[in-house]
Amino acid sequence: SAVISQKPSRDICQRGTSLTIQCQVDSQVTMMFWYRQQPGQSLTLIATANQGSEATYESGFVIDKFPISRPNLTFSTLTVSNMSPEDSSIYLCSATDSQETQYFGPGTRLLVL
Amino acid sequence: GEDVEQSLFLSVREGDSSVINCTYTDSSSTYLYWYKQEPGAGLQLLTYIFSNMDMKQDQRLTVLLNKKDKHLSLRIADTQTGDSAIYFCAETPNQAGTALIFGKGTTLSVSS
């Protein structure tokens, strides 16, 4: 199994600012993903973080708003740019291990005022 | 497109069995997962089943898959108050290792 950590675990931000969330996996993984879970909702995929190339975004999510980096096989960042209160959510990083099962980080709880 | 449906709420008494149901639309799904989310916490992988299996048992958890009806269930035996959480069903369309499609989650409430 893969153990995933995220930083920060939570934050309160002012509108118009940006926050970068870090995701660290304890082993090399093939796939890494970023999801958003809005209050009381299920998880929605934001993008697939590709190692060494641009992320692949889902419909409704764009690189300018959610830039993603993945410089190596164990680390990725998601930036939430120019935040508004509608961006208040839990942001979760996930990774697929060699057994092709998908594990999740503990999430980053973001509140935008 | 792909869709995963779950009932929203389930209430059981401590010691009873809980059965959480899920239906999905993508017949090419390879892996189907159950995740647990406790209040204020992230997602914990409970169990998963490969699409060529009918059943998988892991301690108090039993997963049943009816591929013909595209129906997945999670049975929790001897349900405890600590099992109170939201349970998400998820599938990987097309191939394993790809992003998951989640249901809306079933809130399980266990009363003593």
Image: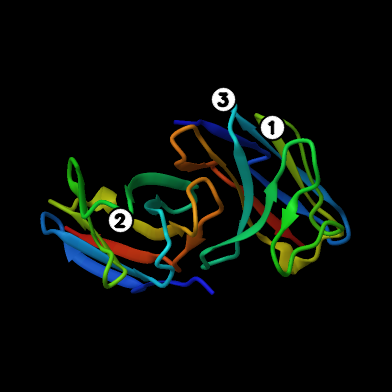
The residue where tag 2 is placed is B84
Q: Residue A1, how many percent across, how many down?
A: 44, 31
Q: CA distance from mark 3 to mark 1?
A: 10 Å
Q: Which structural element holds mark 2?
A: loop
In this rendering, does residue A108 appear at all?
yes
Q: Nearer the viewer, residue A51 or A85?
A: A51
Q: Quadrant of residue A63?
A: bottom right
The residue where tag 1 is placed is A75
Q: Amino acid at mark 1?
A: Phe
Q: Is A106 situated above or below A2?
A: below
Query: What's the colour scheme?
Result: rainbow
A40 relative to A13 in the view: left or right? left
Mark 3 or 2: in front is 3
Q: Residue B94, how many percent across, how many down?
A: 49, 58
Q: Residue A9, how many percent across, how many down?
A: 63, 41
Image quadrant occupied by the N terminus of chain B: bottom right
Q: Residues within 10 Å of mark 1 (few under 14, many from 20)?
A: many
Q: Nearer the viewer, residue A83 or A113?
A: A83
Query: Measuring 49% from the left and 59% from the top, which residue is drawn there?
Result: B93
Query: Measuring 56% from the left and 53% from the top, which residue is drawn there?
Result: B99
A72 relative to B108 in the view: left or right? right
Q: Which structural element holds mark 3?
A: loop
Q: Residues within 10 Å of mark 2 (few under 14, many from 20)?
A: many
The residue where tag 3 is placed is A27
Q: Earlier in the sequence, mark 3 or mark 1?
A: 3
Tell me which chain the residue with mark 1 is part of. A
Q: Amino acid at mark 2?
A: Ser
Q: Amino acid at mark 3?
A: Ser
Tell me which chain the residue with mark 3 is part of. A
